[in-house]
Amino acid sequence: MTIIAKGHCTCGTIRYAVKRPPLFVHCCHCRRCQRESGSAFALNALIEADNVTLLSGAPEIIDTPSDSGKGQLISRCPDCKVAVWSIYHGAGPRFFFLRVGTLENPDAFAPDIHIYTESKQPWVRLPEGVSAVPGYYRRSEHWPQESLQRREKALS
């Protein structure tokens, strides 16, 4: 198995490996992500679930409401309660929204887009050269062709 990155929760109970680069990385500035992260935004790497291998531990799955009304399943460490990834019902179980901050090298996956910037904290400065949208976006307008193809393959 090729491993390009490893990650873990704070206490180390949950350990995982990432086998491919993410499809796309969201830096989400919505109020719900601010609340859930306890910070100004959440940084999530969208990746096929089969490209993440659980090395140790068993996450606790928490069904959490979302602004879409469809909810999300947050995988948390049963001991330290840190969120390691989510499954959004709109995207389905074939995709994880991996919490970039849980990577051993969280610098590895920089944001491809800043979303819900209409509710970003006023002191956050967005970097030049990175897409930013006030709400959500159309995949076809922002994702690289390779990522779109990988997504289609994962759905088939």
Image: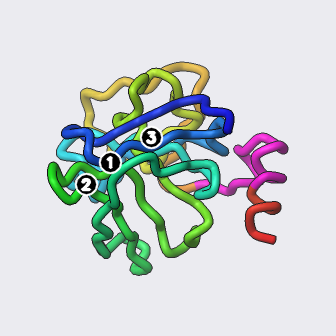
Q: Are marks 1 and 2 in contact (CB under 8 Å)?
A: yes
For label 1, count other residues whose C-alpha is less than 10 Å away and answer few (under 14), some (14-19) or many (20+). Answer: many
Regarding mark 2 in the picture, which secondary structure is present there? loop
Q: Name the residue under label 3.
A: 27
In magenta, the rendered stretch is: 137-150
Image vertical order of residue 84 relative to residue 25, above or below: below
The answer to whether any part of residue 35 appears in the image is: yes
Q: Distance between the residues labelled 1 and 2?
A: 6 Å
Earlier-in-chain disc, 2 versus 3: 3
Image vertical order of residue 116 relative to residue 27, above or below: below
Q: Nearer the viewer, mark 1 or mark 3?
A: 1
Q: What residue type is labelled 2?
A: Cys
Q: Mark 1 points at which residue?
A: 14
Q: What residue type is labelled 3?
A: Cys
Location of residue 155 by image quarter: bottom right
Residue 24 image point, x, y percent:
62, 43
Residue 115 image point, x, y percent:
48, 46
Earlier-in-chain disc, 1 versus 2: 1
Magenta span: chief secondary structure: helix
The answer to whether any part of residue 117 appears in the image is: no
Residue 16 image point, x, y percent:
45, 43
Regarding mark 1 in the picture, which secondary structure is present there? loop
Q: Distance between the residues labelled 2 and 3?
A: 22 Å
Earlier-in-chain disc, 1 versus 3: 1
Image vertical order of residue 21 relative to residue 74, above or below: above
Q: Considering the image in quadrants, where does the N terminus appear?
A: top right
Q: Are marks 1 and 3 in contact (CB under 8 Å)?
A: no
Q: Which amino acid does label 1 sit on?
A: Ile
Q: Residue 77 carries which label?
A: 2
Please give left or right for residue 3 compared with residue 63 in the image. right
